[in-house]
Image (cartoon, helix red, strand yellow):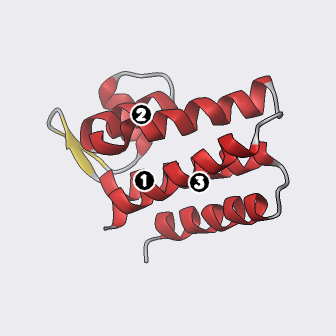
């Protein structure tokens, strides 16, 4: 098992545990997103982009001439994992909202985060 997959599964277990305990829904969403980061990087990287071998997200960011890792990662997902791009973007947006705008996340949102993470996992490891 790759280190990225293992790290993602660890975060996924925490996300599921928090949801099962009906606590900290903001962290359910956030840990689901951070799980997704590891899963999609494990699936996509290394990758050749515009003739450049990208081994990690920093290489991708450089080739795409982007400032942020999250932006570069989202572009990777939209290019190479189109079937789960909407789910990934939802997790990214909602985790940012829960971290920087409001921690008041509903159980319904937390359940959606779990569902989307499961879809991302399947797309990466089926």
Q: Is residue 38 visible?
A: yes
Q: Earlier in the sequence, mark 3 or mark 1?
A: 3
Residue most extreme to the front: 108
Q: Is residue 117 above or below residue 52?
A: below
Image coordinates of residue 50 in percent, x first then y, are 17, 32
Labelled disc at residue 120: 1
Q: Which label's residue is closer to the chain start, 2 or 1?
A: 2
Residue 74's label in the rendered image is 2
Q: Judge left or right: residue 104 versus residue 95.
A: right
> Horizontal placement of 102 versus 39: left or right?
right
Mark 2–mark 3 Cα distance, whole angstroms, equals: 19 Å
Sequence-wise, the earlier of marks 2 and 3 is: 2
- SS at badge 2: helix
Q: Residues within 10 Å of mark 1 (few under 14, many from 20)?
A: many
Q: Residue at x 26, y 35 (%)?
A: 79
Left or right of residue 51: residue 30: right
Observer-nearest residue: 29 or 99? 29
What label does residue 114 carry, if any? 3
Measuring from the top left, give residue 82's x and y in whole percent. Answer: 28, 39
Give me the residue at 64% from left, 50% from top. Answer: 111
* Gap between marks 3 and 1 measured at Cα: 10 Å
Quadrant of res 14: bottom right
Camera-side mark, 2 or 3: 3
């Amino acid at each position: 098992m790759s280190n990225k997959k293992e790290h993602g599964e660890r975060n996924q277990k925490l996300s599921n545990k928090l949801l099962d305990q009906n606590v900290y829904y903001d962290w359910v969403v956030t840990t689901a997103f951070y799980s997704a980061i590891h899963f999609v990087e494990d699936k996509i990287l290394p990758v050749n982009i515009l003739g450049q071998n990208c081994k990690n997200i920093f290489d991708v960011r450089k080739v795409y001439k982007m400032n942020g890792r999250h932006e570069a990662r989202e572009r990777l997902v939209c290019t190479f994992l189109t079937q789960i791009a909407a789910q990934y973007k939802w997790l990214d947006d909602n985790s940012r909202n829960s971290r920087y705008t409001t921690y008041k996340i509903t159980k319904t949102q937390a359940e959606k985060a779990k569902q989307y993470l499961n879809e991302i996992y399947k797309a990466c490891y089926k």
